Amino acid sequence: MTRAERIAEICAAHAALEGPLLPILHTVQAEFGCVDAEAEQVIAHELNFSRAEVHGVVSFYHDFLPEADPRPFIELCRAEACQARGVEALVAPAEAAAGDRVKLKAVYCLGLCSVGPAARVGETLHARLDASTLVKLVESA
Amino acid sequence: MTSVRISDDALALACGADAVAAAFAAAGCTVERVSSWGMHWLEPLVEIGGMGFGPATPEDVATILSGRSAKAIGRIAEHPFIARQQRLTFARAGKTRPLSPEDYTASGGWAALERARSMAPTQVVAEVTRSGLRGRGGAGFPAGIKWQTVLSAAGSRKYVVCNADEGDSGTFADRMLMEGDPFQLIEGMAIAAHAVGAAQGYIYLRSEYPHAIRKLNAAIALAEAQIAPFRIEVRVGAGAYVCGEETSLLNSIEGKRGEVRAKPPLPALEGLFGCPTVVNNVLTLAAIPHILSEGGASRYDNLGIDRSRGTMPIQLAGNIRHGGLFETAFGITLNELVYEIGGGTASGRPVKAAQVGGPLGAYIHPRQFDQPFDYEAFAQADGLIGHGGVVVFDDTANMGALARFAFQFCAAESCGKCTPCRIGSVRGVELIDRIRGSAPVADPVTALPQMHNARKSAPSRAEDLTLLEDLCETMQYGSLCALGGFTPYPVRSALKHWPEDFA
Ligand SMILES: Cc1cc2nc3c(=O)[nH]c(=O)nc-3n(C[C@H](O)[C@H](O)[C@H](O)COP(=O)(O)O)c2cc1C
Ligand code: SF4
Ligand code: FES
C-alpha cells in the first residue's frame, strides 16, 4: 500500500466520527511522525476540504509536525512550577548532552508540578530531575 | 501473604512506583495498584494495613517489611495533611482501584445516577443550583444556571462536554481525578446528560496526559452499560493551551483551528456543532455525584464562605515542601496552605511569592497571604483562583524574568484572533527586555526608516514603564478571551511587588 492509500484508509476508518479531523491527524502523526504537505492533500481530498483548511488546522497545533524528525525526543517541562523547582538551571547541561543527536523540546506542564523538574520520553514520565539525572536521560535516549 | 498498596497514578509512576511495586511482588507480597492519596512528596507511597511508608525505593522493601523502616509515616488516614482535608470529590483517593467497577460500586458509586434518573431533569438542575456549585475550570460560573440554560434551550440534539485540557502550570487535580476515580467523572457526565437531555458526551483531554487517556477509555468501556443510552467519547487535544478555553475547545472537537469564538452566542445555546452544550470542567462534573446523593446538595452548600460554596481541590505545587492535592472548604488562607500545610519551600529558603490560578494568575506577595481562598476575595485583590493551583517560589526567583515569561507564554499560545493578544504579547516581551536591559535602546519599530514622525531617541525607563502599563490596559480590556485579557495580571503584580527585579 502506498502512503497515500494508507492515509486514505485512516480517513475512512474515522468517517463515522463527528468532527473526524483531529483524530485523523493524530493517527497520521503517530504513524508517519509528521503531517506533511502530501498527507494534507490526501486528507483534504478524502474529507472534501480545501488544502488550505487542512493546513490551517495542522499548523495551529503544536503536536503536528510538518516533517518527521528521526531523532529521539525528550520533552522537558519549562512552565512556572518547574521553573520554581529549578528547571532553567538544567537546560544548558541537557542541551550540551543532547547536541544534534537528541531533540530537547520545551513543553508547558505535564501535571507533575509538585515533583518537578519533570520530563517525558514517549509515555514514560520522569520527575525530581537534577542536572545529572537529566543528562543521563538525554544520553540514554 | 502481605498485601501492599501502591498508586499507579502518573505522578507515582514518574517517581518510580512500578519498580517499587515489582520489588514487593518479588518479595512475595500481593500488590494492589490504587489511586494516589495526593501526598506527592511521599510518592511512591506504600500502604500496608493502613500504615504508610514513603518515598519508597526498591531498596527499602526489606526494611519496610521488617517493620523497622525510617520512612514510616504512621497511619495514612491520620496524617495531618490528610486529616485536615474535607475530601468530597477526592473521597476515594488512595482507597480504591481506579478501574475496578466493584470498588466503585462498593464505595457508593452509581447511587447518585440512579437517584437522578428517578427525578425530573428540572429537579436535578434545581439541586445543582441549590448546592451553589460553581465551575472549577476557572471562571467560577454557577453550574446550575448553565445547565438550566441548556435544558431550556430548544433543540433535540444536545451535548455534554467535559473540559479536561488542564493546561495551567501548577495544576493536576483533573489528571488525578481522571486517573484515580474515572467512574466518578463518567457518573457526573451521565447525570448532566440526564439533566439537560443530551445523548452524547465528549471528554476533551490534553495529549500531555497519556495515562489519563488510557484509563478513561478503559473506564468508559467498562461503564457503557451503566450510562446507556448516553455515550461518551474521549477526544485528545493537540498541545494548544488555548484549547482549554471553552469555545476554542469546541472548535477543536469539530476539527477546526482552536480559535476562540466571540460570545454571544453562549455555548449553552449554540455550542458543539451549533447545538446547546454544557461545557464543564472535570472537577465540576466530578462533584456532581456527591451533590446528587440523598441530601448532598445542602451538605455541599453548608461548606465554604460567602458565594464560594463547597470544597475546592487545591493543588500545592512548585517550590513547596509538602506538595500535593489538598481538598478543603473555601475560606482557608494562603498562610495556612503555604506554611502550615505545605511546610514552606522545598529548598528551605524564604518564600518570595505564590502564583495562584495558573499562568494567568497574579503573583501574590507573602504579606497578602492572609487572604481567604474564595472567588470574590481573589478577584477583589486583582487575582483569580482559577483552577486552584498554588505555585510557590523561593527568594531565588526573579519576578522580572517571570513577567517576561508570562508575555512569552501568551505569545506562544495565542490563538491569533485578536490583536492585543497576538501582537501585544510579543511587544510585551520586547518591552520587558528593554526595561530590564542595562542601557536604554531605541524601539526597533520606531527606528524603521518609514516611521518618519516617530522619535528616534531611546525612551527613558519611566516612559517604558508607562508604555508597559498602557499595553497591559489594552490587553486587559481589548482581548477577546482571558489568555490575552489576564496575562497583565502576573505582569502587573510582579512589577508592583518586586520592582527591584525589573532593574
Ligand atoms: C486561555 C484559557 C484556558 C482555559 N483552560 C481551561 C482548562 O484547561 N480547563 C478548564 O476546565 N477550563 C479552562 N478554561 C475555562 C473555560 O473557558 C470554561 O470557563 C470552563 O471550561 C467552564 O467549565 P466550568 O464552568 O465547569 O469551570 C480556560 C479559559 C481560558 C480563557
Ligand atoms: S485573547 Fe488571545 S487567545 Fe484569546 S481570542 Fe484573542 S488572540 Fe485568541
Ligand atoms: S509545571 Fe512542570 S509539570 Fe506542571
Image: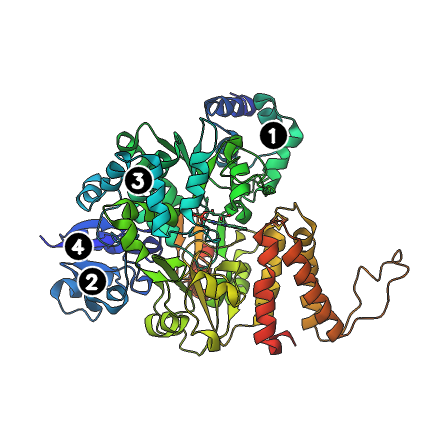
Q: For the residue with label 4, is its CB less than 8 Å from the closest atom of ligand 3?
A: no
Measured Cα–Cα span from mark 3 to mark 1: 38 Å
Which image quarter holds the C terminus of chain B? bottom right
Mark 4 against mark 2, which lies toward the viewer? 2
* Residue B314 location (% of width, % of height): 38, 60
Please give the label number shown on residue B77: 2
Q: Which residue is denoted by mark 1 in the rendering?
A: A40
* Residue on which the image places disc 4: B4
Q: Are marks 3 and 2 in contact (CB under 8 Å)?
A: no
Chain at tag 4: B
Q: Which chain carries label 2?
A: B
Instruction: Please tell me the numbered disc located at residue B187.
Output: 3
**Disc 4 or 3, which lies upstream in sequence?**
4
Are there few (<14), some (14-19), or many (20+) residues within 10 Å of tag 1?
Answer: many
Residue at image position (57%, 41%) is: B258
Local SS, label 1: helix
